[in-house]
Amino acid sequence: MTMADETTSLGLDDSLLESAARCLDTNSLRALSELQLDEAARGRLEVLAQKANEGHLTPEEAREYERFIDLSDIISTLRLKAERQVGDLAHAQ
């Protein structure tokens, strides 16, 4: 992926997340902030993180770990955008 492709992709991602954030109300935002991994997933993440820190991830594990990080980033960004939207609505009233 070229730098231009990444910039375009980030712009599309940001636009989509802004749109999704507008769909969330206070209760949805609270539920989003309370998302947690179950015990098995948390354990798997810890294993992958340890192996990543040691430089021992297989290519498949690296993809799995990267995907988790990407999903975490998406959820965090959506949460921040939604919090800003809810805050803006509260100040407008």
Image (cartoon, grey):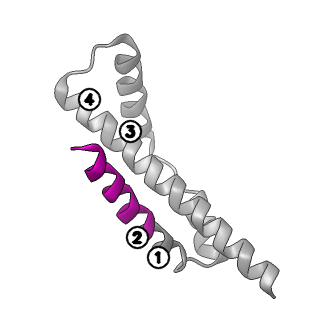
Looking at marks 3 and 4 on the same chain, the residue that comes earlier in the sequence is marked by 3
Q: From this view, report whether residue 81 is shown above or below residue 89.
A: above
Name the mark nearer the viewer: 1 or 4.
1
Q: From this view, report whether residue 24 is shown above or below residue 93.
A: above
Question: Which image quarter holds the N terminus?
Answer: top left
Does the magenta-highlighted stretch encompass residue 28? no
| Callout 3 secondary element | helix
Residue for badge 3: 40
Disc 1, disc 4: CB below 8 Å? no
Residue 16 — which label? 2
Tell me which amino acid carries mark 2: Leu
Residue at 74% x, 72% y is: 87
Dot 3 surroundings within 10 Å: few (below 14), some, or many (20 or more)? few
Does the magenta-highlighted stretch encompass residue 6? yes
Residue 19 — which label? 1
Residue for badge 4: 62
Q: From this view, report whether residue 49 is shown above or below residue 4.
A: above
Question: Which image quarter holds the C terminus?
Answer: bottom right
| Magenta segment | 1-15
| Callout 4 secondary element | helix
**Magenta part, dominant SS:** helix
